[in-house]
Amino acid sequence: MNKGEGDSRRRGYLLRRSIMDYGMGVIIAVIGLLIVLAPVLKLPLNMERTSRYLLGGLFLLYGGFRIYRGRQRDYFND
């Protein structure tokens, strides 16, 4: 295996991983928004207000982190 082929595999892996991070980040952030905005959207979510905001905030924070990680593409310890 020459160096060019390894570089191609590495770039493919980076692309797949960053797309996955973007997608999962958006999905997790949307779930967080749905949790926070449940009363406005009239969704049946039986949670106390504080718990709903805390859980929704955690989802939004983690979704933002996944989007950030997809943008950085820092997956290797080189």
Image (cartoon, rainbow, N blue to C red):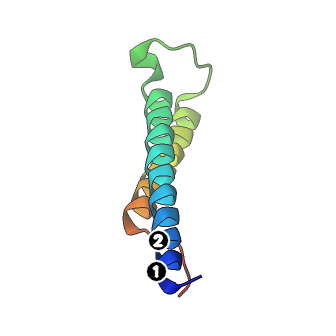
The quarter holding residue 70 reads bottom left
Q: Is residue 73 above or below residue 60?
A: below
Q: Amino acid at mark 2?
A: Ser
SS for dot 1: helix
Query: What x and y, as percent, mark residue 42?
Result: 45, 11
The residue that appears at 39% across and 17% down in the rendered structure is 40
Looking at the picture, tell me which residue is in the foreground, 34 or 74.
74
The residue that appears at 43% across and 50% down in the rendered structure is 22
If the image is split into quadrants, where does the N terminus sit?
Answer: bottom right
**How many C-alpha atoms fall within 10 Å of the one at disc 1: few (<14), some, or many (≥20)?**
few
SS for dot 2: helix
Query: What x and y, as percent, mark residue 43?
Result: 51, 14
Q: Are marks 2 and 1 in contact (CB under 8 Å)?
A: yes
Q: Amino acid at mark 1?
A: Gly
The residue that appears at 54% across and 36% down in the rendered structure is 50
The quarter holding residue 37 reads top left
Asked if one can make out residue 61 in the rendered structure from this viewpoint, the answer is no
Q: Is residue 33 above or below residue 46?
A: below
Asked if one can make out residue 78 in the rendered structure from this viewpoint, the answer is yes
- Determine the residue located farthest toward the front in the rendered image: 1
Looking at the picture, tell me which residue is in the foreground, 38 or 1.
1
The residue that appears at 45% across and 31% down in the rendered structure is 36
**How many C-alpha atoms fall within 10 Å of the one at disc 2: few (<14), some, or many (≥20)?**
few
The disc at residue 8 is 2
Query: What x and y, as percent, mark residue 48?
Result: 59, 28
Query: What x and y, as percent, mark residue 75?
Result: 52, 72
Q: Is residue 18 above or below residue 2?
A: above
- Mark 2 to mark 1 CA distance (whole Å): 6 Å
The disc at residue 41 is none
Q: Which residue is mark 1?
A: 4
- Determine the residue located farthest toward the right in the rendered image: 46
Looking at the picture, tell me which residue is in the foreground, 60 or 72.
72
